[in-house]
Structure formats: C-alpha cells, structure tokens
Amino acid sequence: MEYEMDIMMFVVADPGIDGGEVDQEAVAEWDRVMAERGVLKRAMRLRPADEAKTVRVRAGEVIVTDGPFTESKEWIAGYCLLEVDDLAEAEAIAAGDQLARFGALELRPVWPLGSED
C-alpha cells in the first residue's frame, strides 16, 4: 500500500500528569501492530532531558548548554515516524497510543527539503 504523507509524532512527556505506569508490553504491541499495518516507519525513545545538550551559534561563537532547548516541565521523550494517507489517520493512530495518557502526542507533517508548499 502506498501512503500519501509522512508524519512525525513526538511523544511529549509531562511529569505532572499521573497516567500510572507505562505498560512497556502494550507499547511494544502498539509498535508491532502499527508496523504490520505499514504505517510505523520508525519509533525510538530518547534519553532523559537532563542528558540533553543544546547547541547555538551566536556571532560566530558556539554555545553549548545542558538540558533541553525550552524552559518547560514537558520534554520530548521519543518519536514515531508514521506513513499515513492523511492527518486524520495520524490522529486516529495517536488516539490509540497509550502514551497519550502521559503527556501529549504532537503530530507534525514532514516538510521535505526543496518542497515549495
């Protein structure tokens, strides 16, 4: 099956939300089912935000700081690259992912380099 668009689904964790414990088996099963459907191209966890580095260049000077790039209690905990027919399909897929209980799943259409629109 040929899909129309790629969607980056960021898993945004919020430690202020008590969604219970993450059921790792349920996460693995969701990944397996989505891969079998052909919509999950890649899924990865990210190391904790306190292990992040942010790199900026200002006036020719490289500035490296510890931590995530935003001042927020939420952080990007992982991502999935989805291949779907449209954004509505991606929304339905995200609604079925148990990780939405622990923060948010941000859906962003991929914008290929060189694309005008």
Image (cartoon, rainbow, N blue to C red):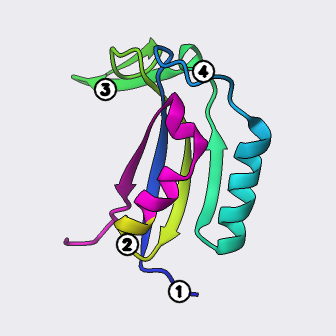
Q: Which label's residue is closer to the chain start, 2 or 1?
A: 1
Disc 2 to disc 1, how far (Cα)? 12 Å
Q: Is residue 49 magenta?
A: no
Q: Is residue 20 left or right of residue 65?
A: right
Q: Is residue 48 left or right of residue 8?
A: right
- The residue sitting at 52% across, 62% down in the picture is 82
User: In which quadrant will I find the C terminus?
Assistant: bottom left
How far is mark 4 from mark 2, CA to CA?
31 Å
Residue 86: assigned label: 2
Q: Tell me the residue at 65%/63% (across/down).
A: 34
- For label 2, the SS is loop
Mark 2 vs mark 1, foreground winner is 2
Judge depth for marks 4 and 2 and give the one in front.
Answer: 2
Mark 4 or 2 closer to N-term?
4
What's the mark number on residue 57? 3
Position of residue 7 in the picture relative to residue 33 (left or right): left
Splitting the image into 4 quarters, where does residue 70 fall? top left
- Residue 19 coordinates in the image, percent (x, y): 56, 25
Callout 4, which amino acid?
Pro
Provide the residue span drawn in magenta: 90-117
